[in-house]
């Protein structure tokens, strides 16, 4: 049974860099995408980005200039860095395993879903 | 403002049925598969439905999903107090800035 364990600094000052890591236990690391999602207090989910075992990434356009997601296949871990944080980046950050692919029909139809989630890390940005 | 539109809240009595809608466009729901997530208070989201209407192992058949055009619907029958949660739809958006989009979430209250 796959489990995701995540950790990182929970309190940051404005302009600092958020850094979180998610470790994958009990399952295959390759063959999947791995994503980060965040949830500001009292608000909905926001997808940050994803990476696969080869290091191929996709990012949310609204965060792309500040986000870096990396992978360490030797440790079955992937990491998130978000630079120049502000109070608006205060949120619970989740890591998740992703099924992502495309089905060819009359057109191209993408499937994307997250079936295993980490417990979340609360990150607060405050001076 | 979320790309996908969900009602902020729905409610129904125990044992009843409820539906939650998720409206999008041709670049997301209209041409891609939809997933649904349940988030109980203080916990991480949990996958309920994937590929529009498939249930992961362990999800009871009280939960169902459907899609028509640019809208998707989550249905829950035989409501239980334990179903009180926030529900989110999500999908891939195939626009030029391709990325994952979510609905704003729907709070289900079981009266």
Image: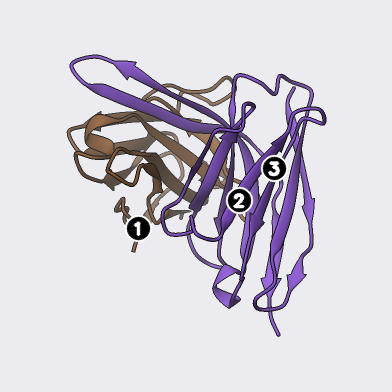
Chain colours: A purple, B brown
Q: Camera-side residue: B67 or B17?
A: B67
Q: Residue at position x 78%, y 56% from top?
A: A8
In contact (CB < 8 Å): disc 2 and disc 3: no
Q: Give the class, few, some or many, for how many residues have Cα within 10 Å of label 3's Cα (few <14, many ≥20).
A: many
In contact (CB < 8 Å): disc 3 and disc 1: no
Q: Give the class, few, some or many, for how many residues have Cα within 10 Å of label 2's Cα (few <14, many ≥20).
A: many
Q: Residue at position x 22%, y 35% from top?
A: B30
In this rendering, would A5 be left or right of A34?
right
Q: How many numbered marks have been drawn onto this rendered protein structure?
A: 3
Q: Residue at position x 44%, y 38% from top?
A: B36
Q: Camera-side residue: B57 or B80?
A: B57
The residue wearing badge 3 is A118
As measured in the structure, the alpha-carbon distance from the residue carrying label 1 to the one carrying label 2 is 23 Å
Discs 2 and 3 carry the same chain letter: yes
Q: Horizontal and vertical percent for residue A93?
A: 64, 55
Of callouts 2 and 3, which one flags the residue occurring earlier in the amino acid sequence?
2
Q: Horizontal and vertical percent for residue A17?
A: 69, 65
The residue wearing badge 2 is A68
Residue B2 is marked as: 1
- Using the rendered view, name the quadrant where residue A81 is placed: bottom right
Q: Give the class, few, some or many, for how many residues have Cα within 10 Å of label 1's Cα (few <14, many ≥20).
A: some
As measured in the structure, the alpha-carbon distance from the residue carrying label 3 to the one carrying label 1 is 23 Å
Tell us which disc is closer to us: 1 or 2.
2
Q: Horizontal and vertical percent for residue B109?
A: 46, 55
Q: Camera-side residue: B9 or A49?
A: A49
Chain assignment, label 3? A
In contact (CB < 8 Å): disc 1 and disc 2: no
Discs 1 and 2 carry the same chain letter: no
Which element carries disc 1, helix, strand or loop? loop
């Amino acid at each position: 049974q796959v489990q995701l364990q995540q950790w990182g600094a929970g309190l940051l000052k404005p302009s600092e860099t958020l850094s979180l890591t998610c470790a994958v236990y009990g399952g295959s690391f390759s063959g999947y995408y791995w994503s980060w999602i965040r949830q500001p207090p009292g608000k909905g989910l926001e997808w940050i980005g994803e990476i696969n075992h080869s290091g191929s990434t996709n990012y949310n356009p609204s965060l792309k200039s500040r986000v870096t997601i990396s992978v360490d296949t030797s440790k079955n871990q992937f990491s998130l860095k978000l630079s120049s944080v502000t109070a608006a980046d205060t949120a619970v950050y989740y890591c998740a395993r992703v099924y992502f692919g495309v089905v060819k029909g009359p057109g191209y139809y993408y499937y994307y879903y997250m079936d295993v989630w980490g417990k979340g890390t609360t990150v607060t940005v405050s001076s | 403002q979320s790309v996908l539109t969900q009602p902020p809240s729905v409610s129904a009595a125990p044992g009843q049925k409820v539906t939650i809608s998720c409206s999008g466009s041709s670049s997301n729901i209209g041409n891609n598969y939809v997933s649904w997530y349940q988030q109980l208070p203080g916990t991480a989201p949990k996958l309920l439905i994937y590929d529009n209407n498939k249930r992961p192992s362990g999800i009871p058949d009280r939960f169902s999903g459907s899609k028509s055009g640019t809208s998707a619907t989550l249905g829950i029958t035989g409501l239980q107090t334990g179903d009180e949660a926030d529900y989110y739809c999500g999908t891939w958006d195939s626009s030029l800035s391709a990325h994952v989009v979510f609905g704003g979430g729907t709070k289900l209250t079981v009266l």
